[in-house]
Every structure is written in structure tokens, then in C-alpha cells.
């Protein structure tokens, strides 16, 4: 019985897991130990990310002793080649290089779409200004598009609402 009590009274030999302050380590031996542990954790997280999210990832790290360590899914060389070629598709020997789409092409398409959107916004704003200038009620309805008819209906309802408000203002003192 005394043996069991003595075991509980013994102090812990290690500090256990504790949150440490993130700062540059001074001792080279501490740097190497910390690098080795954290590198293993980093590569494990990278592997989990690849499995969970079905993504390709590469991690390249140089140790304090200037040794190279790599992790890659499917492999580092393939991912580096993809990155350098700036392609969004996997490198497949069956697909000719001319059929892959580069990031630059995607960015160019995006920029063109944004310019087109801005032009359409300006056109819409200009057409709205034209409606506000006056004489919109004299427009030929049979020549209007669906969007223009909808704008016309909104304008008519807005006019009616304003007319009702104004009539109420005028009629209020008479009552």
C-alpha cells in the first residue's frame, strides 16, 4: 500500500505540453530539435490537408544546418513544374502542353469580364439618367425590351405614388 501512495506523491519528470512563446531560438541544438519536431508536424498537416480536401500540395524547407526537406502530394517535382508553368491542370503526359490553361489566361479572361461588367453598369446608369430627364412617358412601348418595360413600369408606379402624396398634401388643408 505504501508503494502505491509513494507513486502518487512522485513529481512529474517532464513539463508536458505547454504553450511556448514564439521567438527566435539562440542555441543551435534547440533550433535543430525544434525544427525536427515542427517539420514532422508540418508535413503531417500537409498530408492531412491533401487527403481531407483532395488537393495537391508541396512543402519545401531548409533546416538550420541548410539541409533540404521536401513533402509533396503527388510529388514535389510535378507540383514545382506545374507552378513554374503556371498551369491549373495536372501534368498529364497524355495532354499536350498546348491544351493546358495558364493562370495568366484565367486572369486575362477575368479582367475582360470585369471590363464588360463595368461597361454594362455605365450603360444602365446612362439609360436610367435618360428616363429621369423627362419625356419617358412618350416612348414607344412596342419598341421596348423587357428590361425597359420593367423600368417604365417602375417609373409609372413611382410617378403615381408621388402624385398621390402631392394630392394628399394639397387636400389636407382643405379638410
Image (cartoon, grey):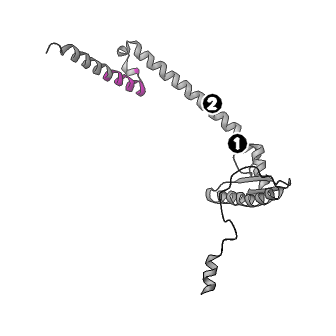
Inspect the magenta stretch and tell me whether residue 80 lies in it: no
Q: Residue furthest bottom?
A: 1
The residue at which mark 1 appears reads as 101
Give, as a single range, the part of the protein colored magenta: 143-157
Work out whether 125 lies above or below 40: above
Residue 58 visible here: yes
Label 2 neighbour load within 10 Å: few <14, some 14-19, many 20+: few
Q: Which residue is identified by label 2?
A: 112
Residue at position x 46%, y 19% from top? 127
Of residues 154 and 2, the one drawn nearer to the viewer in this rendering: 2
- Badge 1 element: loop
Asked whether the viewer can see residue 74, the reply is no
Taking the spot 72% from the left edge, 44% from the top edge, the residue there is: 87
Give the mark nearest the N terminus, 1 or 2. 1
Q: Is residue 139 left or right of residue 163?
A: right
Is 153 on the left or on the right of 26, as rendered? left
Q: Disc 2 on helix, strand or loop?
A: helix
Residue 31 higher or lower than 6, as above or below: above
Which residue appears at 62% of the width and 59% of the height? 52
Give 135 or 85, whichever is nearer the viewer.
Answer: 85
Q: Is residue 154 magenta?
A: yes
**Depth check: 98 or 127 in front?**
127
Amino acid at each position: 500500500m505504501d508503494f502505491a501512495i509513494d507513486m502518487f506523491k512522485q513529481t512529474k519528470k517532464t513539463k508536458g505540453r505547454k504553450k511556448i512563446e514564439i521567438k527566435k531560438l539562440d542555441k543551435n541544438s534547440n533550433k535543430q530539435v525544434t525544427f525536427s519536431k515542427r517539420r514532422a508536424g508540418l508535413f503531417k498537416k500537409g498530408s492531412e490537408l491533401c487527403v481531407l480536401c483532395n488537393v495537391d500540395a508541396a512543402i519545401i524547407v531548409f533546416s538550420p544546418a541548410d539541409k533540404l526537406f521536401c513533402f509533396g502530394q503527388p510529388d514535389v517535382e510535378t507540383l514545382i513544374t506545374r507552378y513554374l508553368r503556371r498551369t491549373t491542370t495536372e501534368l498529364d503526359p497524355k495532354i499536350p502542353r498546348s491544351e493546358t490553361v495558364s493562370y495568366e489566361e484565367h486572369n486575362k479572361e477575368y479582367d475582360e469580364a470585369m471590363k464588360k461588367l463595368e461597361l454594362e453598369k455605365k450603360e444602365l446608369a446612362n439609360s436610367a439618367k435618360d428616363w429621369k430627364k423627362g419625356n419617358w412617358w412618350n416612348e414607344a412601348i412596342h419598341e421596348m425590351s423587357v428590361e425597359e418595360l420593367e423600368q417604365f413600369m417602375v417609373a409609372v408606379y413611382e410617378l403615381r405614388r408621388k402624385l398621390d402624396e402631392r394630392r394628399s398634401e394639397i387636400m389636407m388643408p382643405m379638410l
